[in-house]
Image (cartoon, helix red, strand yellow):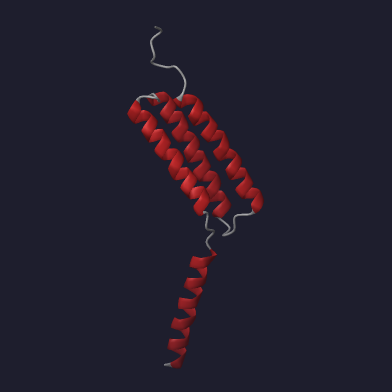
Amino acid sequence: MKRVLFAVTAMALLMTGMAYAEAETPVIDQRQANQEQRIDQGVATGQLNKREANRLNKQQRHINKVEGRAKSDGVVTKKERAKINKTQNRASRQLAREKHDVQGKRPQ
């Protein structure tokens, strides 16, 4: 009986440890959510056409893949965070450019 209790306790502790080992990236995740929301808002207001939105969504998927690779070993290093941040900055600038370009506007 003691062996079974010990084994169950050990497994529970091991599983808890694995859950805490997963890398947390709340700032990166929030920024991703904000950028995806900006894309959706741009489509809704007509600032982005389908082609632009697809290109921007592809960038967001790429950032998610980079983040997933960084998290795969359970630790996101400073270098990995910097790479993700740089990629997010590039995507944010591209999103701003696309939202404020002149597609669809007629010359007056």
Does residue 10 appear left or right of residue 50 in this picture?
A: right
The answer to which quarter of the image holds residue 44 is top left
In the depicted view, which residue is nearer to us: 73 or 95?
95
Q: Nearest the camera: 31 or 71?
A: 31
Where 10 falls versus 84 (above or below)?
A: below
Q: Residue at x 59, y 58 (%)?
A: 75
x and y percent of residue 80 in the render?
Answer: 62, 49
Residue 19 location (% of width, % of height): 48, 66
As drawn, the residue found furthest toward the left would be 44
- Location of the N terminus (image quadrant): bottom left
Q: Nearer the viewer, residue 80 or 39?
A: 39
Which residue is farthest bottom? 1
Q: Quadrant of the C terminus?
A: top left
Q: Residue 97: percent from the left, percent from the top?
A: 51, 25
Please name the residue shown 60% across and 49% down the image.
81
Pinpoint residue 50: horizontal percent, then vertical percent.
38, 25
Residue pictured at 41% horizontal, 34% vertical:
39
Please identify the quarter of the rendering in which residue 89 is found. Answer: top right
On screen, residue 11 above or below 60: below
Residue furthest out toward the front? 108
The outermost residue toward the right is: 79
| Location of residue 104 with respect to 41 vertically, above or below | above
- What number of labels is visible? 0
